[in-house]
Every structure is written in C-alpha cells, then in structure tokens.
Image (cartoon, rainbow, N blue to C red):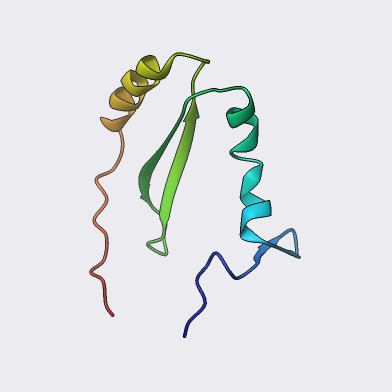
Amino acid sequence: MKASSFENPLIVSGNKIHYYKATQAYTIPFALTESPVLAMPIGLNSRHLPIGIQVVGKRYEDFRLLQIGKALNKYIDRIEYPLNRN
C-alpha cells in the first residue's frame, strides 16, 4: 500500500520535517487571532503541479474576505486538472 503525502516527511532547507509541523506555521497564527482565511488555486507550474495562495482577512471580516476572493478569481487562470489515472 502506498503511503500518503501526509505520512511522508517534507524536505525543508534540506531537513526532513513532518507534514503537519511544516504546515502549522501557515494556520496557527490565524486560528489564534480568529482571522478568516481563504485558500485559492491560482494555476499550475511548469511541471503541472497546483499553485495556490492564502489570503487572510481581518477578524470578523469574513464576508469582505469572500468579496476579495471573488475579485481575485477574475484574474486566476482556469485550471484544467489532468485526468485521474488509477
């Protein structure tokens, strides 16, 4: 059985770091400050891997953040994902 990407360590600056530890820096500050966060796909890189952005809003400004996301969506490349080849 193939291990998921969540079980394999990520290489960060040449060091092996568990997925959850490597990604906590992107989530914990906003959870603690109760800031709304919007993650959006913005395109594919040259190897056809997804690229995304994370937009953070002010506390209690969820609807404003969604409006910003809607405005940004106009500029995002339409992503065509490859077919699932299982």
Closer to us: 63 or 13:
63
Locate residue 53 relative to residue 84 in the image: left or right. right
Locate residue 26 relative to residue 85 in the image: left or right. right
User: Where on the picture, by quarter, is residue 20?
Assistant: bottom right
Closer to us: 79 or 64:
64
Please say if 63 is above or below 70: above
User: Where on the picture, by quarter, is residue 25?
Assistant: top right
Please say if 11 is above or below 41: below
Residue at the extreme bottom of the image, as rendered: 1
Rendered location of residue 73, percent (x, y):
29, 32
Locate residue 80 relative to residue 37 in the image: left or right. left
Closer to us: 11 or 47:
11
Q: Residue at x 62, y 22 (%)?
A: 33
Please say if 13 is above or below 40: below
Q: Residue at x 43, y 49 (%)?
A: 51
Rendered location of residue 86, percent (x, y):
28, 80
Rendered location of residue 32, percent (x, y):
64, 27
Rendered location of residue 83, percent (x, y):
23, 69
Figure label count: 0
Closer to us: 25 or 49:
25
Q: Residue at x 41, y 60 (%)?
A: 49
Q: Residue at x 37, y 15 (%)?
A: 64
